[in-house]
Image (cartoon, rainbow, N blue to C red):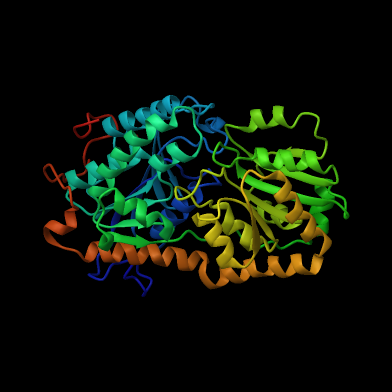
Amino acid sequence: MGDADGTGRDGSGRRRRLLLVSTNYAPEHTGIGPYATQVAEHWAAHGHETHVLAGMPHYPSWSVDPAYRGAWRRTEVRGGVTVHRRRHTVPRCQTAARRALFEGSLLAHQWVAPPRMPRPDAVVAQLPSLAGGVVAARLAARWRVPFVPVVQDLMGAAAAQSGIEGGDRAAAAAARVEAYVLGRATLVGVIHETFTARVTALGVPPGRVRVVPNWSHVAAPSRPREETRRRLGWAPDDTVVLHSGNMGLKQGLEVLVGAARLDPGVRVVLMGDGNQREALGRLAAGVPNLEFLPPVEDAEFPEVLAAADVLAVTQRASVLDMSVPSKLTSYFAAGRPVVASVADGGGTAQEVRRSGAGVLVPPEDPGALLEAVRKLAADPDAAEALGAEGPRRVAAHLSRAAGLARYDALLDEVLAVTGDEASGAGAEGASVTGAEGASGDGGAGVEGAER
């Protein structure tokens, strides 16, 4: 960000003050949270005053972290970043109505109590949070500073494609909110080029879209695989298929339950949590070769991934252009072959092809998934060769340094814009200055009303 000399200053010699709006943030260690955290801590480490407006930690369990239960508002400093948290509902069971309540509670609380901070130089938001996008756009407009949303997922497309109850009705409403948010951006970041058509269809000029891919946010494994397998109770001759991460509707994890039923000789492991965990447990009753593991600590995570024989990524057949699973970057770093049960035309399939680290099978087809696993188990040399391509992909294109440099370049470009353009396409309202910014933690906030 113009601070190659290590001073933490921009090209004008001035330290920056930045606000990142992201519902998900540390201590959440899967999904969007790690990326938001590493971006903010990167800015802080380079000397910039960095604030984050976040929700209470709840993902992927969809249950508020015990350390935050009962808290209404909380301000804390993590890794040099000032984090402003606001309470919201957390729906354990996902429906369109419950998701709307989740977003509405976020919007209301963040709106009436935005961060207590001076005027920033720019506001960045992580989508798919509709609430966070609206609040970030309006704060940026009120402050008359650049607004940069980064699209990690598309809520409108997700509602239509994920299978959530009431999703068809919610999709159009979510898309209207996304169009409002993105239409007020100075520039729009997307994590994959397959999102670009969706974003431009919402009214964003193609010239305002920048691709800022996610990166591998976990360390490479460092311990022998055999050691971790012994600890986990996986025998040397077990063929272990591991899925790690959120257990939600769009993952379509029923395909792994079906594959386990078809072959008792294949050990299927679902590691993580999510709103479909209980339903999957009921579906897997009587399947002795399928086990559930809770999320593991960050230090242990890469070791468990590397201990598996095959890493599975699954999505419902309807999921095409609304999401690219963040787990892929971790899978590639682990050095194990990937079997992707996903739609052939989507961004996930494209990333697996680019990596050379896995094979594609039709979605929602347990037999096809199982056949691919058996082929890899029967040819260890081919499996090792596939797995070895993952770390190469990470080193060449998905390193943390490369990912953060893309955010720096995006911010540099935005802050190089001056005058009316710098305040975004939809800037409105008076400039807000002074020690409290838009309002204090307990104030009335700015006018108007949201993964």
From the viewer's side, name the closer residue of 254 and 390. 254
Look at 22% across and 48% down and name the residue there.
119
Q: Position of residue 283 (x, y in %)?
A: 71, 30
Q: Is residue 244 above or below residue 207?
A: above
Q: Position of residue 90 (x, y in %)?
A: 48, 28
Q: Is residue 308 visible?
A: no
Q: Position of residue 271 (x, y in %)?
A: 68, 43
Q: Is residue 318 above or below residue 86?
A: below
Q: Is residue 284 visible?
A: yes
Quarter of the figure with residue 284: top right
Quarter of the figure with residue 302: bottom right
Look at 76% across and 68% down and name the residue there.
382
Q: Position of residue 263 (x, y in %)?
A: 82, 44
Q: Is residue 19 left or right of residue 102?
A: left
From this viewpoint, which residue is outermost toward the bottom? 5
Q: Is residue 246 above or below residue 326?
A: above
Image quadrant in which the C terminus is located: top left
Image quadrant in which the N terminus is located: bottom left
Look at 57% across and 59% down and name the residue there.
329
From the viewer's side, name the closer residue of 27 and 203. 203
Q: Is residue 239 above or below residue 294?
A: below
Q: Is residue 3 left or right of residue 351?
A: left
Quarter of the figure with residue 99: top left
Look at 52% across and 66% down and name the residue there.
398
